[in-house]
Amino acid sequence: MHKIINEGSIRLKAPKTEKISKAMGVFYNPAMGLNRDISILLLNAINRDNLQIADPMAASGVRSIRFLKELANSKIKRIFINDYDKNAVRLIRQNLEINKIKYKNNKKVRISNDDANLFLLNSTGFDYIDIDPFGTPNPFLDAACRRIARGGILAVTATDTSALCGTFPKACMRKYWALPKKDAVMHETGLRILIRKIQLIAAQYGKALTPIFCYSKEHYMRVFLMSEKSRNNADDVIKRHGSLNGAGPMWLGSLWDGDLTCKMHKNALKNRIFRKDNGLIKLLKLIKEESKINAVGFYDLHDACEKNHIRNLTKKSELISKIKKLGYKASETHFRGEGIRSNIPNGILVRILQNK
Ligand SMILES: C[S@@+](CC[C@H](N)C(=O)[O-])C[C@H]1O[C@@H](n2cnc3c(N)ncnc32)[C@H](O)[C@@H]1O
């Protein structure tokens, strides 16, 4: 059973179901609308046109159809929409028709029904690849890293946050070759562990992958990595792997391109497609602020007070202005409500918390 729904500027035939799960037939999760919004904002914000785009796990086709409708005309040279599920491919065709997008004899739109790895490996490469699987992206990383073009962007979603954030440390060791830690900073360390894993796979092929935008939200993590074909740069990427608070190894470089983040936030405010109450604007604003601060990890206020036996918790906004008055940078973090990202040394922060 299907129903017609709206997402962004498109209409879509999607499975009628109460429960979002792998077993729902063709998969469609309205909560991931924000994930797709961010892909669109990012691709519209980068200074590149004529992109060869791959959507290897397209399900209903919602992401690609939104790309076709919502990316600037100059952005897409060709888009490849693939899924190994026959029902998904049937639905993708129907959804293209509903949105009046020609796919027969249209060089710009290619549909296929292959395994994602075969689809990627049989191609000549892409400027944008979106890996959006159920659970871990691991099975698709090798082919994606091999087929991402010079200057291309590899987007990866991971929903196995329980491994990355330390609920199952052995699973994280096996799958991501790093030790996670279940603490206040776990979403950031998990994200950095995921980034390192992807970077290591790309490094095998002489590619340097660096993050340009990432975030963690509810049940998933999302990273956008820019690819450069350069053995030296790949070596430099590896040099920036290390540990944080007993977790790791992980990527210790920056997570965001500040200018890109500002542009995405500005464009989201301007475009009425994005002005809905899914937390997008708030998330982008938070990330815009934290992208200006060069600090790995953040302070958790409850942790800091507990460790230092401080009873009266200073209000977060007050604390941020006090830190700034001392000449340090500070902002909230999207990773955690009680978190503050700052380059202030721990000792000075504790003195502020103690009102000394
Ligand atoms: C989480 S859904 C993708 C959601 C979609 N990208 C979106 O934005 O709505 C995962 C999809 O991957 C497909 N899939 C899983 N393993 C695959 C494989 N090895 N090759 C191709 N498609 C695969 C499934 O059929 C499913 O449609």
Image (cartoon, rainbow, N blue to C red):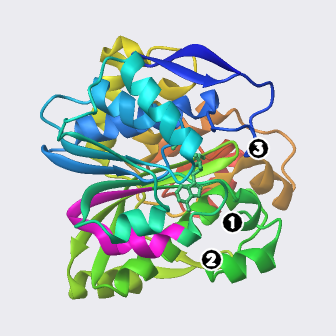
Instruction: Say what amino acid the circle numbered 1 marks.
Output: Leu
Distance in Å between CA atoms under marks 2 and 3:
26 Å
Q: Does the residue at mark 2 contact the one at mark 1 (Cβ under 8 Å)?
A: yes
6 or 105: nearer the viewer: 105
Q: Quadrant of residue 43?
A: top left
Q: Residue at x 56, y 15 (%)?
A: 5
User: Which element carries disc 1, helix, strand or loop?
Assistant: helix
Q: Which residue is mark 2?
A: 176
- In the image, residue 273 sits, relative to residue 142, either above or below, namely above
Mark whose residue sits in front, 2 or 3: 3
49 or 81: nearer the viewer: 81
Q: Residue at x 57, y 49 (%)?
A: 85
User: Quick check: is the Cβ at mark 3 less than 8 Å away from ligand 1?
Assistant: no
Distance in Å between CA atoms under marks 3 and 1:
24 Å
User: Does residue 286 show up?
Assistant: no
Q: Which residue is mark 1?
A: 164
Whether residue 147 is in magenta: the answer is: yes
197 or 343: nearer the viewer: 197
- Which span is picked out in magenta? 140-155
Q: x, y (%) of residue 67?
A: 33, 33
Q: Quadrant of residue 247?
A: bottom right
Answer left or right for 87 relative to 281: right
Answer left or right for 102 relative to 245: left
- In the image, residue 24 sits, relative to residue 116, either above or below, namely above
Answer left or right for 47 relative to 156: left
Q: x, y (%) of residue 289?
A: 43, 39
Q: Quadrant of residue 50?
A: top left
Instruction: Say what amino acid the circle numbered 2 marks.
Output: Tyr
User: Does residue 213 show up?
Assistant: yes
Q: Quadrant of the N terminus?
A: top right
Residue 23: numbered disc: 3
